[in-house]
Image (spheres, rainbow, N blue to C red):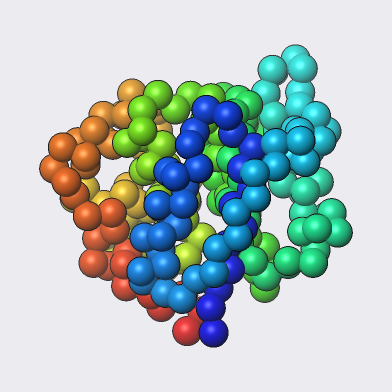
């Protein structure tokens, strides 16, 4: 049996090759069907619904909830959705300035990843951002495992693993460059094991 991911691409800034390559890395670890949809007009409806003019940002929680209620998404309930938009986004928490992206769990589903390209300034950063959120979608790092820490969710402390959490733009860029320069594997052995085991 295979999982399914739907890539809903609303970006004009990021070439579709980048998220598709990241999804292919997960597909090497578990059976995965991928559906690609270039759909900026479809997504714009939900961006408009969740846009907060006083902040000049999209409320990601409201955006995801509105999208989740559509017939199109209900028909593919169990599939994971990876959504990429170019608008500046925040989590919905008033204390949040912005976020690059986030994963939302949905019962009996792989859930939703919402990613914003607005503050992404390099291909390595974009690549690692997508890999990081896909790791969360597929259970990395897992609860009760060694070498983890809590920082806006559970994250991995293993050296050069993409599942480490970086809190600001500069640190995220530097870490992505460090990983690229070292030609580091995407997921450490522990996170790779977590991804292989989810749902089994």
Tell me which residue sits at (24%, 33%) in the image: 177
Which residue is at the front of the view, 80 or 160? 80
> In the image, is 12 to the left or to the right of 190?
right
Tell me which residue sits at (55%, 45%) in the image: 102
Which residue is at the front of the view, 153 or 84? 84
Question: Percent from the top left, x then y, of residue 19?
Answer: 47, 47
Q: Residue furthest top?
A: 54
Query: Up-down: is 189 above or below 187?
Result: below
Which residue is at the front of the view, 186 or 35? 35
Judge whether residue 140 can be spotted in this image: no
Question: Percent from the top left, x then y, of residue 190?
Answer: 27, 67
Question: Percent from the top left, x then y, of residue 142?
Answer: 40, 67
Tell me which residue sits at (16%, 46%) in the image: 183
Question: Percent from the top left, x then y, of residue 194?
Answer: 37, 71
Query: Up-down: is 184 above or below 50?
Result: below
Question: In which quadrant will I find the N terminus?
Answer: bottom right
Quadrant in which residue 5 is drawn: bottom right
Tell me which residue sits at (73%, 67%) in the image: 77
Query: Up-down: is 83 above or below 27?
Result: above
> In the image, is 22 to the left or to the right of 13?
left
């Amino acid at each position: 049996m295979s999982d399914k991911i739907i890539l809903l691409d609303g970006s004009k800034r990021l070439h579709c090759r980048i998220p598709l390559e990241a999804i292919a890395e997960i597909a090497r670890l578990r059976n995965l069907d991928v559906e690609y949809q270039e759909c900026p007009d479809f997504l714009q409806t939900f961006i408009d619904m969740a846009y907060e003019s006083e902040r000049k940002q999209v409320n990601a929680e409201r955006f995801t909830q509105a999208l989740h209620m559509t017939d199109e998404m209900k028909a593919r309930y169990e599939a994971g959705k990876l959504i990429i938009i170019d608008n500046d986004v925040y989590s919905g928490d008033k204390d949040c300035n912005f976020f690059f992206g986030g994963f939302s769990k949905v019962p009996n589903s792989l859930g939703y990843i919402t990613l914003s390209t607005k503050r992404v300034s390099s291909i390595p950063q974009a690549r690692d951002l997508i890999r990081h959120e896909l790791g969360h979608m597929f259970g990395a790092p897992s609860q009760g495992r060694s070498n983890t820490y809590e920082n806006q969710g559970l994250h991995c402390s293993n050296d050069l693993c993409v599942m480490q959490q970086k809190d600001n733009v500069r640190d995220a860029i530097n870490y992505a460059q460090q990983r690229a320069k070292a030609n580091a594997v995407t997921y450490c052995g522990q996170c790779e094991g977590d991804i292989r085991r989810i749902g089994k």
